[in-house]
Amino acid sequence: MNKKLRAKVIDILLLAMIILPFVACMVLRILTRGASEGISITGAQVYFTVPMPLMDLIISESQVVSCAVMIALLGLCLFLTHGIAVIPNSKRQLAAEWIVEKVKGLVDNNMGDRFHVFAPFVTAIMGLSVFSSLSSLLGLYPPTSDVNILLGWAILVFILITYYKLKGGLWNYVKGFFQPIPFFAPLNVIGEIATPISMSFRHYGNVLSGAVISTLIAAALQGLSRMLLGWLPGILGEIPFLRIGIPAILSMYFDVFSGCLQAFIFAMLTMLNISNGFPEEDYERRMAKRREKALHRA
């Protein structure tokens, strides 16, 4: 097998890696979800439950779609970087380099040079959020409409925020809760706990509200079409003419624009909370003391 043929085969396999997970989720949804009449706004479908000692592990549609999104993102990254060269020789390599440059610029502008290593993490958050929201265009349940998924993302970010706050020392971190006066300690603790909750609920609320509004408007247009145009003869009276086009425009806003916007906001909050929580002066002071101790020992 020559190099060109092998490269084409690999490209086809990577494209299949991007597409097939979503196809599998669509087939699974069709096979496990029965037809419904009228307006149907429900949460993620539970496929099965795994018994566990403390509490049962629920495997739901949002988890399955999340796994499909991660597999597809991995396939997309491999596809964009397949055959990469020192001098760009393909449009997909140019696209990959453009994404890397834009995200690196975004991270450097919002977090500073100290946190430039966060570019892959921020890219992963934005890609996972965007693709999860856009999965609704395929008729799938978007994981960003499940507060459990988003709370998991927010808890991971909160762990990173706390880790970098502790870079200034445990005592400085605890002392920060009593600033500016000790009376504010309970409020500061509540504010600390509220960080992951507010991040997850903001993203979840905006995506879910868009799905609910789109469903209600589509149902209303169907009823209005039946009321105004139901007098048409034969099958023409059963066609919901008023639903043609308008729901698609709403979907472009709620699913595409709003989904991408919320992904950007979540990434921005992640960068700002981590960088602003880092006590740079305390950290430099600790590092200076460590260097002095190391010199004395030497």
Image: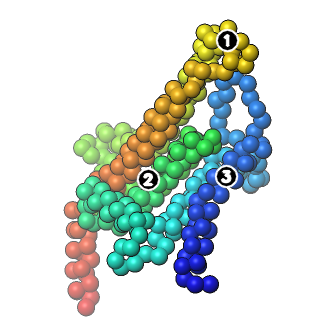
The earlier-in-sequence mark between 2 and 3 is 3
Q: In which quadrant of the rendered image does the C terminus lie?
A: bottom left
Q: Which residue occupies 21% across, 80% down?
A: 292
Q: Quadrant of residue 43?
A: top right
Q: Which residue is mark 1?
A: 232
The residue to which callout 3 is attached is: 23
CB-based contact (under 8 Å), mark 3 and mark 1: no
x then y, percent, for residue 208: 53, 34
Report whether residue 155 is seen: no
**Amino acid type assigned to the residue bearing label 3 in the image:** Val
Front position in the image: 102 or 2: 2
Q: Nearer the viewer, residue 153 or 231?
A: 231
**Secondary structure under the numbered disc 3 in the rendered image:** helix
Q: Would residue 20 be visible to someone looking at this image?
A: yes
Label 1 secondary element: loop
At a point 67% along the width and 8% down the height, the residue shown is: 231
Image quarter of the N terminus:
bottom right
Number of residues whose C-alpha sits closer than 10 Å to that of mark 2, classed few (under 14), some (14–19) or many (20 or more): many
The residue most toward the bottom is 298
Q: Amino acid at mark 1?
A: Leu
Q: Earlier in the sequence, mark 3 or mark 1?
A: 3
Q: Look at the numbered discs 1 and 2 and tell me whether their residues touch, using CB distance below 8 Å.
A: no
Asked if 116 appears above or below 146 in the picture, the reply is below
Q: Residue 73, how many percent across, how many down? A: 53, 60
Say which of marks 2 and 3 sits in front: 3
The total number of labels drawn is: 3
Sequence-wise, the earlier of marks 1 and 2 is: 2
Q: Compared with residue 204, is residue 105 higher up or lower down, i.e. above or below?
A: below
- The amino acid type found where label 2 is placed reads Met
